[in-house]
Amino acid sequence: MINRFSTTIKLQKVMAQRMGLSRRSAEKLIEKQMVVVNGQPAHIGQRVNPTKDKIQVVGKDLTKIKQQEHLLVHKPVGLVTTKSDELGRPTIMSLIPEQYQHLFPVGRLDLNSEGLILMTNDGELSQVLTHPKFKIEKTYQVLPNRKITSPAFAHLKRGMKIDGRIVKPVDIHRMPEGWITMTITSGQKHIVRKMLKKSGYETDRLIRTQFGPLELGDLESGKWRELTREEITTLKTLTP
């Protein structure tokens, strides 16, 4: 007997993967009867075969939407990590070719920060990587405006309260020429810069070198690459 669960998956998961939505956002569209499967209104928990069933969302055919795509981008200083910017500032989208313009950045690096940005069309994955409850680790190389003293380094290592929350590095260690490497799970805005400032320092440079299982490696600033098969497989293990 053929197990139908081996060839079908939940409708909201297909929508999340192909539309760049969170699973909850997909469920809301189903609840509002804006989703049709094979000509019939869909329901929460419905299982579908994406290769055989005709799925339409607000009249848009999901079968014509490409499967999951992922890029790793090395963001330089001076670009905004958004699809577009109301102030007209250049965005990270200027680094990637036309065929990938439908992808969106996962999380953000501020204008003056550099390093690893994941671009994807997988809304479910984006939710996992950015939601605080999943505690995804992010590693940064940080250059303070002057060499950090031993007491200040100990202060960073112990953790501190930032914007009403206790923030403590998962790992922190010194590097040559005054740099430090810090791994955190917090997704609070400007959190690394705020931690240094509370310790008495400004941040001259901030480079994200790792995001979850993804590593920046030797990818040059301003360049991008597709994820490897192994990286994609590892990312899939993160989603429920």
Image (cartoon, rainbow, N blue to C red):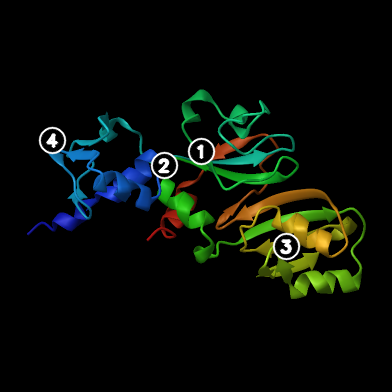
Determine contact: label 4, label 3, CB under 8 Å. Answer: no
Quadrant holding the C terminus:
bottom left
> Can you identify the residue that label 2 sits on?
20
**Considering the numbered disc 3 on the image, is that residue within a helix, a strand or a loop?**
strand
Residue 202 image position (x, y, % from top left): 86, 54
Which of disc 2 and disc 3 is earlier in sequence? 2
Type of amino acid at the residue the image marks with label 3: Met
Determine contact: label 2, label 1, CB under 8 Å. Answer: yes
Whether residue 230 appears in this view of the structure is: no
Type of amino acid at the residue the image marks with label 1: Phe
Type of amino acid at the residue the image marks with label 2: Gly
Q: Residues within 10 Å of mark 4 (few under 14, many from 20)?
A: few
Q: Residues within 10 Å of mark 1 (few under 14, many from 20)?
A: many
Name the residue: 67% across, 39% down: 75
**Considering the numbered disc 4 on the image, is that residue within a helix, a strand or a loop?**
loop
Q: Residues within 10 Å of mark 2 (few under 14, many from 20)?
A: many
**Mark nearer the viewer, 1 or 3:** 1
- Determine whether, in the image, residue 153 is placed left or right of residue 185: right
Q: Which mark is residue 182?
A: 3
Residue 107 image position (x, y, % from top left): 57, 48
> Can you identify the residue that label 4 sits on?
39
Residue 182 image position (x, y, % from top left): 73, 62
Q: Which mark is residue 104?
A: 1
